[in-house]
Amino acid sequence: MIKTKTGKAAHERALRLFAMEHGMKKKKLSTLLVGMLLLLWLAPSAWAADSTDLQEIRRQIEEMKKDYESRIHELEARLQKAEEAAGQTPTSTPAPTSTASNGNTADNKNTNTASAAEVVPVAAGAPASTNAFNPDISLILSGTYAHLSQNPNGYQITGFMPGGDIGTGPRSFNLGESELGISANIDPWFYGAFNLSFDSENNASIEEAFLQTTALPAGVKIKAGRFYSGVGYLNEQHSHTWDFVDSPLVYQAFLGSQFHNDGAQLKWLLPTDQFIELGMEAGLGNSFPATDNNSNGVGVFTAFAHTGGDVGDSNSWRAGVSYLHADPQNRTYEAANVANSMVDNAFSGASDLFIGDFVWKWAPNGNGERTNFKLQGEYFYRREAGDLAYDTSGLDHTGNYLSRQSGWYLQGVYQFMPAWRVGLRYDQLYGGTVHYGDNQAYLAPTNYDPHRATLMFDWSPSEFSRIRLQFAQDRSRQNLTDYQVYLQYQMSLGAHGAHIF
Amino acid sequence: MKKTLLILTVVLGCCALFFPSAQAAIKVVACEPEWGALTQELAGDKAKVYVATTALQDPHHIQAKPSLLAAVRTADMLVCTGAELEIGWLPILLRQSGNPAIQPGKPGYFEAAEFVRKLEVPTRLDRADGDVHPSGNPHIQTDPRNFAVIAEALSQRLSEIDPANAADYKARYADFLSRWKTAMARWEKAAAPLRGAAIVVQHKGFPYLEQWLGLNEVATLEPKPGVEPTSGHLSEVLEQLQRQPAKMIVRAAYNDGRSSEWLSERAKIPVVVLPFTVGGDDQAKDLFGLFDDTIALLLKANS
């Protein structure tokens, strides 16, 4: 019953739509249709008269009928499609605007309620689809061509314990990271997201897989699972949203490019006019600078605070401070000893990292369509203290270890005309002080401050595609100056990307 | 370590208790200026309205900036266009705000486009067609008849959220509606000469205005919705205009003016910069001013 009613209702509405398009009332349309039908019925008897005029009229009516029928069908199809689309969000059933051009509100009210009565059975009668609740799916395609003057294999930043996923990337043509993202509300209480990344060697890795509460009151949110930590500014952002091909040196040196972790996050957005957000995380510590210690406790702990606001219509900013504490056990790495041969070492102890970050965005009147500018910088300071096991696969000599190291980057990206941007970044690391204690016979601190300068141009014909050219003079390795040229594409398919700040 | 965690949790918990969210006037965040103005008409001093964007900003391309997050965090109600206009930024604000009252499906979440019939609903969805909106064209605020429908729904919603002032909302709605009806009759009478006028638009932002006033859109400067005008496409439009002249080029206040100026010079037709929403120019101070000015500007260009 519902079905036939649905069909009828749809037909009715198609007729009304049709009438609207032709600026006539429904009554007028039905009169016209009845008149046409009457003429058609009368036509055969008139045929007897054998008048060429009548034949012509009949032909014209036939044409009109065909024309109108096809247009009604078209409208019915369009209406059905629209209703199917609306069926996914039952609340968004369209209500008609007034058909009367004088905007009579009594009319408005009538058509409104009338249509609501009609629309309800349509929505209810829509075919049950198991696909209707499919989550948002997005796919990022990226690829690079790299020309590097120095051998990228065995890349290490001089004086900094390597960890995580760092380096310049391989030479020549390379498939970058392809990223599949799936996200949706789970129920009235939770939101879930999943990000799978595939590298060019066909390895899949879970970048993020988390749930987040949506119904907790008072600005409190809890996230659990695997996620990018909220420390710093850039850490939470996926690589395809970066303004440069690679991550800043401080991120590579202190966080192994990007810190993600299996754990839980508590965030609280204060109910103040000024944006203030506090957060903390506890986790297993399965990524650099932490290690998975096979213990029941917390392997890594972070705390952060962000604030921000606007200055007039044209400027907005955000600044923050973050802290990360980890207790890595046997964090192994490979390094050159005083005899310049490579040995395996392991660090156990406490790692404390402090980050200060800020970003400033400018666009005339807050409209960045033509020009806009973004200035961003972060400062990192890390203290690591504990024991260092030298040459774990040979001598295995343990001694005290203490390091105090820091670094920063500053970058500016300017959109000088629609779709075109230019960016400049400077990276600086300070080798700081490193004490090897009893191991100082084997390992020597370097007196070197790695740095890098990067220039980038990109072109984004739409917000879903970007092509980038990047030049860098990379002096992160002592006595090696790497001249780098990258050409990169980044494409975004599927669900609309988020305009993060 | 554990102690630090415990202390922080307690501190955060205590702080949360010390900030009661009870407000005298309800706090409304309007995504676009037109909904801010409408809410103000319907709620008066019963609502404190924060407008997230200005008329000089493209509502498609807003970022979830800190000031907006802070505003959404304490809002009792959100009044937005919907129809995927704010798809790039509103979902992040909603998710990060930690404010359950304004989540989709709750009374505090109001999408104006739900209540009007959308035009230009695409029959196929493909990004090769540009930045198309699956629900139809979201720029519903260019037809005053839509405001009459939306005002009724919004007024009811305000009463639902703030029942104590329901009578006041009702009275304000009735008052607004009578003033709006009078104004609409005035606008329609004044705009009669515009019926059938051929116009070129920069962005497909005016189908509702065109339907209301019977304007005839013959070309767009953007080759595809949301794609910047290219010189090749502009030359094509110019060529088309030589065969099929138009009266004017229409753009919104937030659109970049260069392509329309370029075409205006060559096609020898004026550019009309419509306020597009409240605050788009000095005259469009409120909703009435918005349409007074829109009609006046169109008439001037048409003469």
Image (tube, coloured by chain):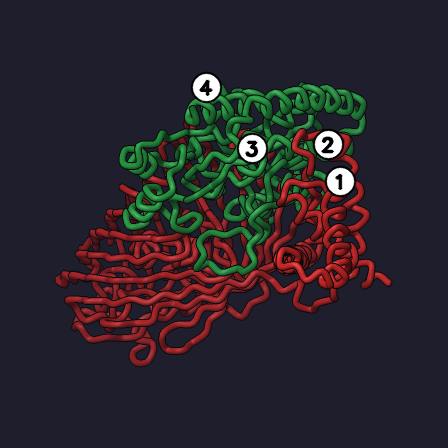
Chain colours: A red, B green
Single out the mark in the foreground, 4 or 3: 3
Q: Residue at x 77, y 61 (%)?
A: A45
Observer able to see residue B121: yes
Q: Residue at x 69, y 24 (%)?
A: B42
Mark closer to the chain start, 4 or 3: 3
SS label for mark 3 = helix
SS label for mark 4 = loop
Vertical comparison of A364 with B43: above or below: below
Chain at numbered mark 3: B
Q: Residue at x 34, y 48 (%)?
A: A381
| Residue that mark 4 sits on | B282
Point out residue B138 in the picture as x, y percentages from the top left corner: 56, 43
The tag on residue A112 is 1
Furthest residue in direction right, as rendered: A1
Towards the viewer: A304 or B297: B297
Single out the mark in the foreground, 2 or 1: 1
The alpha-carbon separation of the residues under discs 2 and 1 comes to 11 Å
Single out the mark in the foreground, 2 or 3: 3
Vertical comparison of B166 with A349: above or below: above
The alpha-carbon separation of the residues under discs 2 and 4 comes to 28 Å
The alpha-carbon separation of the residues under discs 3 and 1 comes to 22 Å
| Residue that mark 3 sits on | B213
The tag on residue B152 is 2
Point out residue A113 in the picture as x, y percentages from the top left corner: 79, 41
Left/right placement of residue A78 relative to residue A286 reads right
The alpha-carbon separation of the residues under discs 4 and 3 comes to 23 Å
Furthest residue in direction bottom, as rendered: A394
Asked where in the image residue B177 lies, by quadrant, the reply is top right
Q: Amino acid at mark 3?
A: Leu
Vertical comparison of B200 with B187: above or below: below
